Image: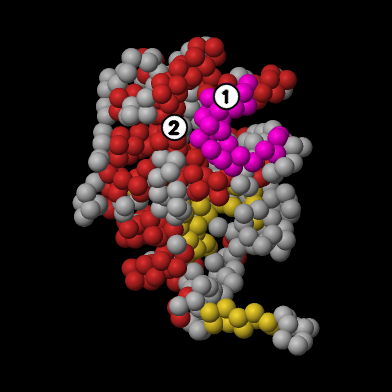
Amino acid sequence: MVSRSRSPSRSRSRSRSRSSQSKPPPPSSSLNLSPKTSPPPLPSAPLALYYYLTILLRLLLSPSISLSTLLNSSYPLSDITLTYIYQLTIPLKHWSKPHYRKGTYQQDLKDNLVNVAIPGTGVPLSYFVLCKAFYGCFILGVIPFVLFIQEIHLKLLSRPSSFTLNLLGYDLDWCSLWRINCNLTHLHALKTRDGGYEMENKWSFILKSESLGIPISPCLPYPGLCIKHKNEEGGLGIHFYRNAREGGDWIIQKVIRNSERVSEMLPPKSPLSTFRVMTISNASIKKPGEEEKEDFQELSVVFRAGREGALTDHDSILFPVSASSGLLLPGTTNKNWYSTYSPFTPLRSRDVKLSKHPDTGNVVSGRRIEEIDRIVAVCKDAHFKALPRVPIVGWDVVLCSEEDVPGGICLLEVNLSCNFFRGVFDEDKWWRFVKEVIVEMEGRD
């Protein structure tokens, strides 16, 4: 770990506040706990761009420079800024190195960015990882240019400037936060080869959870399924699925339903709507066997309220939840980021604040999730038992009405290269964690 004294310009920024409102719910405006860290005094925009490009070029020309070395340099910038700029170069350093779920890190980048586009352009982010040169151009030129266009847009809307903030790692969009988690997880997996990363495989996760008594969505015991179309003949419209328990490729589960309290907030024909809970493990930088329950903490909780007619909650409104009180905060969306090859999409969606579900008018913001303590406890316990040395985990949790799910809470799956889905979380704590894990991993052979 790295620690150092700070001048006022490098002082630790304030942690985000948690919601503590009590019933009845206050107006929606007072529920808007925006996930922003208060940065130290920042340089002017031209000077910020100079520092950003200078540091990146130095790192690209001297790839042996570690984060620890950069943190102890003379740049008058915060640890958050230096860590943010440094992690942008991790993909280039590990371009052809193995990834825990793909052949190389580049392949994982290509596969996971193919359906994500720069808002307002339709250009898939996967284009920028086709080769090292493209990615280098992306971090050196495209990111500053996009932020400059955003700055013009904000000026037209008479909104506060964000160029310097965003360029130096503050008030980042959800996609940037997601990619930081991905870089962190890849580096940790590569250095530790920890078996916990096998949990990304859905079947491995189910078997491990069953052996440890972790509550998961129930699997059906049948050897396989035969699915027939109701009006096909001559051997057509027949599909056979062999259960993974019998050596097949398919996990066979029944469709489970949202609990009554969750259903009250959703449209009649909505999908199973989950809670994304993010937890971190301080045991990720410890030796195997040294982990303790106190090492596992929650970062954020988000309720993904599914849309009318959708099959899954990937199409949803994102309502952050206070992990301490269970209070649902105003909802938002990130759908404009998923409009590839469609330039006519909103440039910004993070300003969207919804107190009601748009498909029904049902009030969501201001309600409380009474089960929040149990939800968080299930996730922290699962992190401790199943993959204690994996640094950050995103859990998809269900509140359901199934009789064979004790307590009505179960885990659907685990996500290790995970994103916050615009949850409200303590950025200072997260950045300290990111910095410590990177420094520790780079110090290992």
SS of the residue under disc 2: loop
Tell me how far mark 2 sits from mark 1, CA to CA. Answer: 14 Å
Q: Residues within 10 Å of mark 2 (few under 14, many from 20)?
A: many
Q: Pinpoint residue 120: horizontal percent, then vertical percent.
A: 71, 34
Our reading of the magenta stretch's main secondary structure is: helix
Q: Amino acid at mark 2?
A: Thr
Q: Are marks 2 and 1 in contact (CB under 8 Å)?
A: no
Reading the image, the residue beneath label 1 is 141
Region in magenta: 120-148
Seen in the image, is 377 located left or right of residue 293?
A: right
**Which residue lies at the image location 30% right of the left edge and 28% below the top edge?**
68
User: Relative to 132, does residue 271 appear above or below in the rendering?
Assistant: below
Q: Pinpoint residue 408: horizontal percent, then vertical percent.
A: 49, 67
**Which residue lies at the image location 49% right of the left edge and 76% below the top edge?**
248
Q: Is 144 contained in the magenta span?
A: yes
User: Relative to 350, does residue 409 appear above or below in the rendering?
Assistant: below
Quarter of the picture containing the C terminus is top left
SS of the residue under disc 1: helix
Q: Nearer the viewer, residue 107 or 231?
A: 107
Q: Pinpoint residue 364: horizontal percent, then vertical percent.
A: 63, 50
The image quarter in which residue 75 lies:
top left
**Which residue lies at the image location 50% right of the left edge and 35% below the top edge?**
132
Reading the image, the residue beneath label 2 is 89
**Which residue lies at the image location 41% right of the left edge and 23% below the top edge?**
61
Q: Amino acid at mark 1?
A: Gly
Quarter of the picture containing the N terminus is top left
Mark 2 / mark 1, whichever is N-terminal: 2
Q: Residues within 10 Å of mark 1 (few under 14, many from 20)?
A: few
Say whether residue 436 is visible.
no
User: Relative to 220, does residue 177 appear above or below in the rendering?
Assistant: above
Say whether residue 389 is visible.
yes
Q: Is 342 contained in the magenta span?
A: no
